[in-house]
Amino acid sequence: MPFGLLKYGLRKQHPGQHHFTPTKPLKSHYDVVIIGAGGHGCSIAYYLAKQHGITDIALIDKAYLGGGNTARNTAVIRSNYLTESGVNFYRDSVELYQGLSNEFGYNIMMENRGQLTLAHSDAAIRSFRWRAEVNQHLGVRSELVDRQTIRELVPNLNLSEDSRFPILAGLWHADGATARHDAVVWGYARGACQRGVELHQLTEAQGIEIDAGRVVGVRTNRGKIACGAVVQAVAGASSVVGKLAGIKLPIHSFPLQAMVTQPYKPVLTPHVSSPHVHVYVHQTSRGEFVIGGGSDPYPLYHTRATLDQREILSAATLELFPFLAQAKVLRQWAGTTDMTPDYSPIMGLSPVENYYLDAGWGTWGFKATPISGKTMAELVATGKVPALIQPFELERFYRFQQVNEAGATAASH
Amino acid sequence: MKLLRCPLNGLRNIAEFLYGGEVHPLTDPSHHGARAWAEQVFFDDNAAGLVLEWWCHRPTSYWFIAERNTVTDQVLRTFASSEYYVESVTFKRVSSGDPNA
Ligand SMILES: Cc1cc2nc3c(=O)[nH]c(=O)nc-3n(C[C@H](O)[C@H](O)[C@H](O)COP(=O)(O)OP(=O)(O)OC[C@H]3O[C@@H](n4cnc5c(N)ncnc54)[C@H](O)[C@@H]3O)c2cc1C
């Protein structure tokens, strides 16, 4: 690799590389159509091609590659959930993330900085203790820490006992990390395209053709595609696309907002999250403070940013890091998040044969990008639901067997 | 500041209101079994476009209905629920037997 770089540097011309398939006409038939070229859609395409040799795939997106929530999230990767199903699933995802840069030959800028969740009440301490026990039992590094340890981990944190909600303890998750979200989707898309998958941007699914209970095609703004199977991986548009196939989902779509400050020199290493004051903060390697956690109070299919949320997020941030009082906010944005009642995804089979769901990713789906791709690809290729995602099937709502991760997702990341 | 017109209290700051979910017909669990009940509790249209939904003015605990566009975030109309529900809904108690039947 360094030699390649040297040769490239000494060359007179520096030709750009084509990472993705240049736009071609749509074929009239594909084995698989994947709706949505975000991290999830691309990851599914990648593992279908790589692990299962299925390459006759159209990966379609109504806008551009990775421009949905994949571009808008705050890139928190962690596995300190509460239920056994949740912890096992996200743990495998975090492990896959660790190897992605090498697998892609493409730097996803994985940074293992750890994650600290703050308790401001006795009830929170009890739930942290519970989470730490469950996590350790399932092989995830997670422990309850006291104020002294918190001070050592985050010297700039406001640990005053006079603050509105004093910090009592923390849940330290050494496996917590961040990665460059764009690089993740580009890496998966490039790997898929290199193996023959066709990426079709500006191609919107407008109708789903079903024959005798089985999906047979997708109508798009660029014409009709016949296919053997369809995967929908459209995050914020899950209910809208599901409806095209006649599938009703237990989802409500809310905008989730985040913002970022001007850059500072490095002063904050881990990711810090407070479910109580409802904000999370980390400093990127560029020095900017990323501030997230603001869901709008009612459903909306719009990605405007609001002054209300800026005020709420700022107030909460200043509780934790008063030194940011003078910081300028550079950008604020939103993404439409598909929230489920139990804060867990909806993955797997649907009422329509060969139509697969990868939905309900709400505010927590970036960290699941690798494992959801891998397990969904296995499902599409074999027709069998992998054990890891069985608990997340749509049917769970009819059996009243939700996978309650509301507590572990309380600060929306 | 975004304002919402409460049929009882007039124009108020939207922070005074609570969103209460979509308006749809209630399923009587004694007639429809567990699947229909699950749909009633968890599943919604979540439509992109015009919707009817419940809102509550928190300081006065007053519940009413709003017609809102979920794509543009414009509220077209708010009105008292008595305009929509002419009769009150009462459910009979399931006496015995398998609720899953
Ligand atoms: C502000 C914010 C912060 C977040 N922070 C975190 C975090 O820290 N950690 C974490 O794990 N998760 C986080 N999330 C959640 C995470 O971003 C999402 O769950 C994840 O990116 C979903 O990936 P996806 O590939 O399913 O969706 P997307 O990236 O949204 O891709 C879906 C694609 O589908 C396309 N599409 C939609 N409708 C159609 C159609 N009809 N036809 C064709 N294409 C269509 C869209 O154009 C889009 O490109 C956050 C989300 C937001 C908004």
Image (cartoon, rainbow, N blue to C red):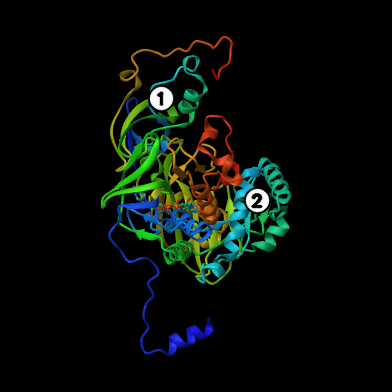
Question: Is residue A396 in view from this perspective?
Answer: yes
Is disc 1 placed on a helix, strand or loop? strand
Relative depth, front residue between A317 and A202? A202
Question: Do circles 1 and 2 both sit on a common chain?
Answer: no
Mark 1 Cα shell of 10 Å, populated few (<14), some (14-19), many (≥20) = some
Q: Position of residue A201 (x, y in %)?
A: 33, 58
* Residue type indicated by callout 1: Tyr
Q: Position of residue A274 (x, y in %)?
A: 58, 50
Mark 2 Cα shell of 10 Å, populated few (<14), some (14-19), many (≥20) = many
In the image, taking residue A127 as reference, residue A404 lies left or right, namely left
Q: Position of residue A244 (x, y in %)?
A: 34, 39
Is disc 2 placed on a helix, strand or loop? loop
Residue under pointer 2:
A167
Residue A214: quadrant of the picture:
top left
Give the Cα separation between the discs numbered 1 and 2.
37 Å
Residue under pointer 1:
B62
Report if the beta carbon of the residue with label 2 is closer than 8 angstroms to ligand 1: no
Residue at the spot x=37%, y=34% of the render?
A212
With respect to residue A174, does A216 lie above or below?
above
The chain to which mark 2 is attached is: A
